[in-house]
Image: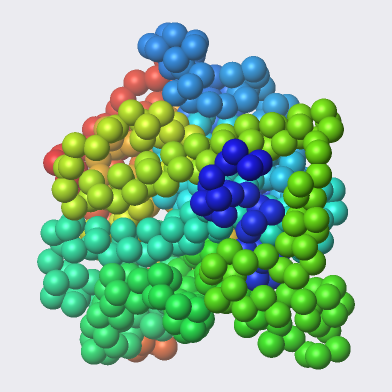
Amino acid sequence: MDRVPSVIRWLFDSEHGACDRLIPRWLFLRALGCIYFSAFFSLVFQIHGLIGRDGILPANEYLQAVAHSLGYRRGIWFAPTLLWLSSSPHTLTVLCWVGMVASLLLALNAWPRAMLVICFVCFLSFVSAAQDFSSYQSDGMLLEAGFIALFFAPPGLRPGFGRASPPSRASLFLLQWEWFRIYFESGVAKLLGGDPEWRHFTAMDEYYQNGPLPTWIGWYVQHLPHWFHASTVYATLALELGLVWMLFLPRRWRVVCFFIVTPWQLGIILTANYTFLNYFVLALGFLLLDDGFLLRLLPQQWKKSFVPGATTVTEVSPAANKSGEEPTGLGEARRSEQGRPQSSNEGFRSGFKVVKLSLISVTLGWIFYSSTAELIWMFSTIPLPTTPVAVLEPFRIANRYGLFGIMTRGRYEIEFQGSEDGKTWVAYPFRYKPQDPSKPPGFYAPYQPRFDWNLWFASLGSWRNYPIVLRTEVRLLSNENDVLTLLEKNPFPREPPREVRAVIWQYWFTTMSEKRAQGLWWRRQLVGLYAPTIEREPDGTIRGVEWPTASRSE
């Protein structure tokens, strides 16, 4: 290891890592396991209807198209997924359950590095084959953090707090860097996106109503006066563009930042359902803290049971840690080994450590370069090398973020309807998204209803750009069970409808007086036909019966 420059060891070697971040690491990894679990748990009930062989966007058809276009070798790199081996119903189910078990073991601190590998591979396998159903920034956030956490987590089967292997400074920084970029790049997107609502401080006036899946608390917040919404616009921009820079300030400022962003994320969780996104950003926020601060929050009688030898942890001052000084005992043990002749086994282990440290340095440095280049390109097209960024892109471990750069103007909801005679139409009820005006908006996060979520995006554009709508109509014409499980119930249980169509409504929150008088949370107005009305001929062919007029976006 003497051949490795000291700065490399200080950055990338866990033996020289941040000894005062054991509790934040423990908290973050437990939270990461729970977030992974929520992602896989939601897929168990949806994956067959989304990408199964009889689903809306079958994975096998997609992978065949990729292989035909790029060839298998390039196709596997373009879409890195285990589903190349098989995309059968059993494989999809096993993928979810293996991910759930691994994430649960990660949350229980059992062999964390191995469980992180399994979670990452299983989730990437779904994301790479899910097409439109995995086009969310939250998926990239989880994959990026999940990969970096491989270098952040302690080794061993039951590592506890991993006091012998503190987190490397590079992996800790990259996770903090991701936290910073999520906020800062979202702020930059708001400024550079050209949406006048952010400049005029009106972006939040209808935000709670027009988001993908509102909550009933959001309904009440929506009715607060304009000055409140304008102040939240200012606070959002100030936080995303200014306050998050406190990450790079001394320890005291990072703690202050934590107590600002944590209530902020809790407020978002209470007023909207953004799946696991805000829970994930909340978990990343714990990495702003250190052991010295967190131990002071524990009762005295809990400290030794919570962190064995807690007094030795708190003795590591921020100044000593910043300079790379090692805890007493560990440094003495190392110094005692110096000057002693190495055996062949020790030489082999030393060489292996050099190779291992070199690979870690290249990998984490590569991620930092790619994510930094993505951030720079938001401001200017500086001619930086693009190949390193493009190579990592299929794995989503170095992403560009930018939440709510353009605010949604108006809430539209797609509704599927079936008919047995072409005259009387019956709606298919949804599980999560608004439909019944008398039903209050619910709480679903961190559960992620990807079908309902994607229909919100589709409602903002044309059906020609969102094939999931027409494909869903085709599946409903045959009462395809996997797709029907994405809905609350099947209004045609005996036999499929003769015709299926997709209409679009515009929704608004009711006023306080309307809710008191009518008991309704929503009012809605039919806009018209969204996608073609289709029917199945006796010979099995499907034809269009009625076509929509030009959509709002056209």
Viewer-closest of 202 and 437: 202
Left or right: 553 in relation to 241: left
Nearest to the observer: residue 492 or residue 119: 119
Q: Is residue 188 above or below residue 62?
A: below
**Image location (x, y in percent) of residue 293:** 63, 82
Residue 15 seen from this side: yes
Which quarter of the rendered picture does the C terminus lie within? top left
Q: Residue at x 64, y 36 (%)?
A: 354
Q: Quadrant of residue 353?
A: top right
Q: Is residue 488 visible?
A: no
Residue 450 location, x and y as percent?
50, 47
Q: Tell me which colouring the rendered structure shows.
A: rainbow
Q: Position of residue 17 (x, y in %)?
A: 63, 58
Number of numbered discs visible in the structure rendering: 0
Position above or below: 553 against 272: above
Residue at horizontal 25 percent and vertical 80 percent from the top: 234
Camera-side residue: 44 or 264? Answer: 264
Q: In this view of the protein, which residue sits in the foreground, 343 or 436?
A: 343
Residue 24 spot, x, y in % from top left: 64, 69
Decide: is 533 above or below 306: above
Q: Quadrant of the N terminus?
A: top right
Residue at 63% over, 32% down:
355
Q: Which residue is painted at 63% across and 42% down in the image? A: 2
Q: Is residue 237 left or right of residue 109?
A: left
Horizontal side, residue 260 vs residue 484: left or right: left
